[in-house]
Amino acid sequence: MKNHRILAITALLALLSSAVQAHTHLQKAIPADNSVLSIPPADLVLHFSEATRLTAVSIQKEGNGEPTSVSTLPKEAAQALTVPMSSLGPGKYLVEWRAIGTDKHVMSGTLHFTVTGK
């Protein structure tokens, strides 16, 4: 009886593990998290493991009050999503994003980068 419980628990854990791994996730961002850039990026590019739809992106310069919402988001789901960035001056920036995968899993994340202006 004890062996059956152990097998059942092991099977359940394996099933849960594969379900967690199946969710869409961010694979790469341009600019990369914690990158230091001499010139500001014209675009933010997010590469996901599966087709994903961005639902919100905001950017905030360190020392400024409220984040600015980016209003020009891609309308269609895709694995690589490009968001045009407004003119950014030198400084440290925080980008917050939210997206929904084709599996209806909502995810969010943050990226930090610095523009040196040199």
Image (cartoon, helix red, strand yellow):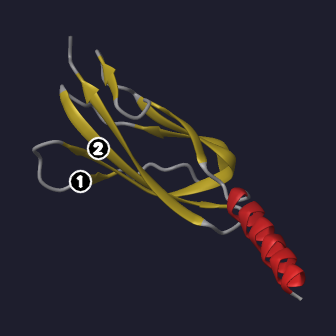
| Residue where numbered disc 2 is placed | 94
Q: Is residue 116 above or below residue 86?
A: above
Identify which amino acid the numbered label 2 is placed on: Leu
Q: Is residue 19 above or below residue 28?
A: below
Q: Residue 61 falls in which quadrant of the image?
A: top left
Mark 2 or 1, nearer chain start: 1
Q: CA distance from mark 2 to mark 1?
A: 9 Å
Outermost residue toward the top in this view:
118
Tell me if 35 is positioned left or right of 47 in this view. left
**Residue 12: x and y, percent?**
79, 75
Q: Residues within 10 Å of mark 1 (few under 14, many from 20)?
A: some
Q: Which quarter of the figure is the N terminus placed in?
A: bottom right
**Residue 74: x and y, percent?**
55, 49
Label for residue 67? 1
Taking depth in this image into account, of 24 and 52 the one nearest to the observer is: 24
Residue 76 visible in image: no
